[in-house]
């Protein structure tokens, strides 16, 4: 845990990470285990002051909610778009904080759900994609790049920041290059 | 540094040429802004074709990095693609949402006379990003049109055409095809 806190201290000092609250688009790449442990900690500071819209692509509501509660994420400020639970026949709570989609492959639905939430919360919000890899696995890479390009342009026009998490070395070089060039900052852990 | 290499090549050529710069994937926008600043500091003015980012996002970033936007005109393709409202800022050239390649080239060509410096540039922020939304054949046609258009500059002007591409995409076939048509390739 001490290591995690040290890593968070380092990340917190990165100006672009801090600027997510004012519209920066940041990618964090690391190994799968570290990302899993770190994701609630990465979201905590934002959840204290703004709405956080989380796109869950490879784990569902029930996989993350305990981690969020244990790590001080203000879940009353969190809205989850869960692309996993339905495919596992799990029913998410009907409390206005989570919407479940059939699966991540319905990219158009994911896009609409994300935009609807940013419309609802407007500038006092940020988006988190956890994680990029499942999108690439479940969908044609060019369509994912196109999806991200339009999504990030719309977020930028609204000055809404975005944090994307990705497992390092999991993407083919040219796919990664097409996507990564769109970010304001790439942080390797 | 890639910005210095770009400037050296431009200063070596009295006549406008076509250049491809391969930018570091993880520092793409940072390097691109550095190149742009260097060109402007060299007394040049240019048209910035923004496929990647909307104009609204470029402005604060350029201000923070001392890129003088008064020496630039912008074509905000990203915003047009996203279907958002384009800025009415005086330095933004409006284009249709359909992103017709002929219209795009015409917009560039007709805007060049608005730039008063002798040495001008057309700066394509990312040639690969357009392929996400347009067929490869259209992207190649766009680059070909642009190469021909900028090489036919007026007698009292020199136009440098700069295509930017992420290093990680340099091995893609269509990028290699474009690289064969340019005069210089600069690598980070």
Image (spheres, grey):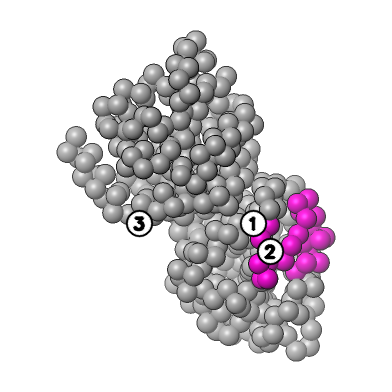
Label 1: state its secondary structure.
loop
Q: Is residue B153 above or below residue B23?
A: below
Whether residue B98 is in magenta: the answer is: yes
Residue A37 shows up from this direction? yes
- Find the residue positioned furthest to the top: A89
Dot 1 or dot 2: first in sequence order is 1
- Tag of residue A15: 3
Q: Which residue is mark 2?
A: B88
Chain bearing mark 3: A
Residue B131 shows up from this direction? no
Q: Which residue is mark 1?
A: B51
Which residue is rendered at x = 54% and y = 37% of the image? A120
- Label 1 to label 3: alpha-carbon separation: 25 Å
Label 2: state its secondary structure.
loop
Q: Is residue A150 left or right of residue A51?
A: right
How many C-alpha atoms fall within 10 Å of the one at disc 2: few (<14), some, or many (≥20)?
few
* Picture coordinates of residue A108, whole percent (x, y): 64, 31
How many C-alpha atoms fall within 10 Å of the one at disc 1: few (<14), some, or many (≥20)?
many
* Picture coordinates of residue A49, whole percent (x, y): 36, 43
């Amino acid at each position: 845990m001490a290591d995690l806190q040290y890593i968070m201290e380092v990340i917190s000092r990165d100006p672009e990470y801090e600027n997510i609250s004012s519209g920066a688009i940041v990618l964090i790449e690391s190994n799968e285990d570290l990302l899993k442990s770190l994701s609630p900690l990465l979201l905590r500071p934002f959840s204290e002051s703004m709405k956080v819209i989380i796109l869950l692509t490879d784990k569902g509501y029930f996989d993350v909610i305990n981690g969020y509660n244990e790590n001080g994420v203000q879940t009353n400020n969190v809205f989850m778009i869960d692309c996993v639970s339905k495919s596992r026949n799990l029913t998410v709570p009907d409390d206005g904080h989570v919407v479940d989609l059939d699966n991540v492959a319905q990219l158009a639905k994911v896009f609409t759900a994300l935009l609807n939430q940013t419309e609802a919360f407007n500038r006092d919000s940020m988006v988190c994609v956890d994680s990029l890899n499942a999108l690439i696995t479940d969908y044609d890479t060019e369509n994912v790049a196109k999806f991200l390009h339009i999504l990030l342009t719309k977020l930028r026009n609204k000055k809404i920041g975005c944090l994307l998490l990705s497992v390092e070395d999991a993407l083919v070089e040219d796919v990664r290059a097409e996507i990564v060039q769109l970010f304001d900052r790439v942080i390797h852990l | 540094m890639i910005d210095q290499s770009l400037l050296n090549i431009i200063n070596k050529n009295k006549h406008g040429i076509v250049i491809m710069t391969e930018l570091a994937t993880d520092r793409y926008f940072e390097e691109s802004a550095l190149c742009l600043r260097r060109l402007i500091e060299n007394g040049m003015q240019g048209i910035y074709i923004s496929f990647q980012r909307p104009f609204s996002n470029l402005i604060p970033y350029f201000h923070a990095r001392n890129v003088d936007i008064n020496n630039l005109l912008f074509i905000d393709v990203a915003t047009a693609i996203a279907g958002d409202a384009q800025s009415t800022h005086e330095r933004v050239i409006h284009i249709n949402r359909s992103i017709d390649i002929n219209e795009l080239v015409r917009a560039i060509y007709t805007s060049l006379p608005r730039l008063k410096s002798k040495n001008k540039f057309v700066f394509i922020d990312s040639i690969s990003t357009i392929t996400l939304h347009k067929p490869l054949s259209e992207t190649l046609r766009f680059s070909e049109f642009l190469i021909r258009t900028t090489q036919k500059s007026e007698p009292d002007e020199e136009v440098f055409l700069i295509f930017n591409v992420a290093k990680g995409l340099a091995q893609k076939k269509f990028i290699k095809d474009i690289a064969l048509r340019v005069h210089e390739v600069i690598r980070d």
